Amino acid sequence: MTVNNRSQRMFHWTILALLTLGAVIAMAPMLYMVATAFKPAAYVPEFPPKFIPDNPTLENFRTAFNSRNFDTALFNSAKVAVSTALLVTTLSSMMAYAFARFEFPGKTLLFYTILAMMMVPTMMLIIPQFILASKLELINSHTGLVLVYTAGGLAFNMFLLRGFFESLPYELEEAALIDGANQFVIFWRIMLPLARPALSTVGVFSFLGAWDEYIWALTVLTDPAKRTLPIAIQNFRGTRATDWGLVFAASLTAVVPTVLLFVFFQRYFVQGITTGAVKK
Amino acid sequence: MKAKLLVLVLIAALALPAFAHAQDDVVTVEFWHTYNEVSPENEMLVNTLIPMFEAEHPNIKVESVPFPYGEFRQTILTALAGGEGPDLARLDIIWSPEFASLGVLLPLEDVMPDYADYADAVFAGPLSTNVYEGQHYGLPLDTNTRVFMYNSTVYEQAGIAEPPATIDDLVAQCDAVTALGEDYYIFSDGGTYGWAVLPWIWSFGGSLTDGAMTTSTGYVNGEETVAAYEFLKDMIDSGCFSPSFLGGGMDSGTGYFTNLFASIMDGPWMFPIAEAQYPDFTIQTALLPAGVGGSISVVGGENIALFVDSETEAALEFLRFTQSDEYQLKMSEVGQLTVKPALLESDYFQNHSYYGTFLQQLKTARARLPHPAWSQIEEVLTDAGQLILRGEASAQEALDMAAEEIDGLLAEYE
């Protein structure tokens, strides 16, 4: 018994040590970014790397926010990312529910056609998409950006949510039908609340996707006042010399909202709401 | 009372279209570039030069649009495919021939009657980077080159009195530096791309192609070019040059500023970096050590080009403004070396603390191949360099293969 206990404890500590090591390795670049953001001038990498700056300063953050378009870009990104997250969540959940529960002609074909679209690489689509956007007058417009991000996010998120809806018990819907609810009420009042963990995953990931997206935004937004955060950060880089302190301060500013979002939505990620909802 | 009101309304009705008309007369010119958003160059452009131009040309508005350098080429090409390109852009000199070959730039001889006056006023080297099939598709905007930068602390420790005048001198100084310790090197650079290896190839008397850019066989795999690569390999193998040529080890700038690397090869932007990050460090410059081909560096810099479907007349006005003494001097103050030889006689350049070496080096410096396929040719060259320096192929073998590939690329444009 004692031997068993001891070996179990040994195992426990070894696992803990390995996990800590893994976490430190994974965190190091992030910590270096934080450290560099507070360094006064960081054009060439120092040797040895310092994780605690000698003369910490907020100067980089000041420079970033005093620059021409950084705060506008922050606002633009928030606007675009929130709109995209709302649209993707709403539309993909409706699509997913239809694919999970309804029968209609061509359903399988349509479903796989939508999924097949995910296999086309984004870079290949950039020029045709740009020409289309230009004809629809969606260049230099946030509406255009949100439309493209939403369209791009629907396939995967619909696939994710369909799986979730399929895992929910039919009996709940049958019970609601007996009580006189129509399909919309069932979807809106019963299925959506149950799908909250999956919906928050979809919401957070579509938010992050739109918040981080770079190439398309760079291509279609040529009005500096309309540009989003990733472009503003890249514009702090120079052709020959880059002050990494400034770039990392700007990146850190961009990371903070996403971390907050995760912390806030984490409780929804917890599964198991349907446990015991139906008596078998 | 009523009559008065009527008169007012009438005046307003007459004045409004006039206002609207005045608004219509203002032409907006989009100028795309890659100045870092918070750089002094960008501040100078946006806060001083554009307002100066707009005050002189009340009917032209210049919109400055910064882009990140890495994606600039691709972004412009995509925008042009959708008919949403800029009026004017500041292009890296290595991109000009490619853009011209795609038919997106306007040949200045055709649209600018006074083009010859402007072309005569700039350095011939940078101007040549605008040529495609005999016509000029832009004017040089700024120029730069790489010079030899040495570290006086390392020199003192190693007992070296003077920077090397020749490549042989550099080799002779190596042992004194490597004797200082394991992390010490006589010279360091960041890779095998054209910007890094071309000065060695040219100084060894080699080249990439014939003058007309029709063949590389006998040039890129010629005796002199092979010798240049063999030299680089020997120096790295013997521990004289740092392994950063292979993409590993310490960054060249870091080693130089922290007194480990005796010398590097770099451009004028290193001075503001030193001032900000290593204020106690003084960069010492000299001409590149000469080989049998001379002391030949590589020309960098940017051109300004006019795009098809642009507001041509207004854009041309701004283009002319960028070639004025005023514009060129102001930009030189923030590290953008002028392209006008006449300005070198000005007090500003005569008294400048470090432009002197750069201007002297520029006299013999050469441009990277002004060819539409340069980006692909450079890839071939970079890969061949890695094969050689890593000892995976002999210099002759790797360069023979490169010559074959480069000939193929050149043939596509004939």
Image: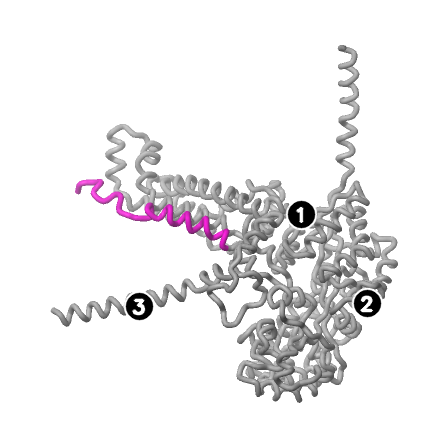
The subunit letter for the residue under badge 1 reads B
- For mark 3, give the secondary structure: helix
Question: In this figure, which residue is indicated by the disc labeled 1?
Answer: B84
Give me the C-alpha separation between circle 1 and circle 2: 43 Å
Give me the C-alpha separation between circle 2 and circle 3: 64 Å
**Residue at screen point 30% across, 48% down:** A270
Percent x, y for residue B222? 70, 83
Q: Amino acid at mark 1?
A: Glu
Where B121 falls versus B284 (above or below)?
above
- For mark 2, give the secondary structure: helix
* Residue A229 placement, left or right of A258: right
**Residue at screen point 77% across, 18% down:** B8
Front-most of residues B407 and A54: A54
Where B339 falls versus B106 (above or below)?
below
Where A88 falls versus B239 (above or below)?
above
Question: In this figure, which residue is indicated by the disc labeled 3?
Answer: A17
Which stretch appears magenta? A252-280
Residue A115 shows in this picture: yes
Q: Dot 3, crowdedness within 10 Å: few (<14), some or many (≥20)?
A: few
Percent x, y for residue B380? 62, 73
Q: Judge depth for marks 1 and 2 and give the one in front.
A: 2
The subunit letter for the residue under badge 3 reads A
Q: Judge depth for marks 3 and 1 and give the one in front.
A: 3
* Residue B399 placement, left or right of A14: right
Residue B388 shows in this picture: no
Front-most of residues B91 and B188: B188
Report the magenta stretch's main SS.
helix
Q: Amino acid at mark 2?
A: Gln
Q: Which mark is residue B350?
A: 2
The subunit letter for the residue under badge 2 reads B
